[in-house]
Amino acid sequence: MLVAPPQALWARALCVRGEKVNLRSGPGTQHPVTWVVGLYTPLVELERRGVWLRVRDQDGDQHWVHHRMVVTSSQFRCLSVRSRIAELKAGPGAKQAPAELPIADKYTAFKRLGERGDWYQVEDISGVKAWIHERDVWRPVVVQAMEF
């Protein structure tokens, strides 16, 4: 009896590294732009075709991006706001004072600096630091599964 080898299914966490990056409907500049995203926008890589990556965003929508426009989460970690509005705090806790920038809208992207409990310390594109609760964020994670 022959048994087929397992097939690995994977996805890789990515972060946008440019200030204005075009996501496209297909792998190439001839395809229409589907969304323009900014620095630190998190994505999940699903497939690679040459220099183009098929990615998934926080809403589950799929796009294509040139590989030079993103970095892996090993280079820096990122997250984005998934709730309509998220409160940002000066420290890790609901009772902490509001941060310099007290709220962030959905899709606002941050560089993730660290974590304490269920709070993430983040930095925005201008270098302002704050803390945000995990319930308000979406972050790409590395996923690996085996299919038999």
Image: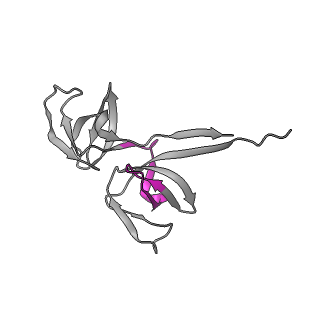
Please indicate whether residue 87 sits to the left or right of residue 79 in the image.
left
Q: Is residue 125 magenta?
A: no
Please indicate whether residue 133 sits to the left or right of residue 69 in the image.
left
> Which residue is found at the position 57% from the left and 44% from the top?
10
- Residues 118 and 147: in front is 147
Q: Position of residue 131 (x, y in %)?
A: 24, 34
Q: Quadrant of residue 80?
A: top left
Residue at the limit of the structure toward the bottom, as seen here: 30
**Residue 22, placed above or below residue 105:** below
> Which residue is found at the position 59% from the left and 39% from the top?
145
Q: Position of residue 75 (x, y in %)?
A: 44, 44
- Residues 143 and 51: in front is 143
Q: Position of residue 93 (x, y in %)?
A: 22, 26
Please indicate whether residue 83 sits to the left or right of residue 28 in the image.
left
> Which residue is found at the position 35% from the left and 43% from the top?
79
**Magenta-tinted stretch:** 55-78
Q: Position of residue 31 (x, y in %)?
A: 45, 72
Q: Quadrant of the C terminus?
A: top right
Q: Quadrant of residue 83?
A: top left
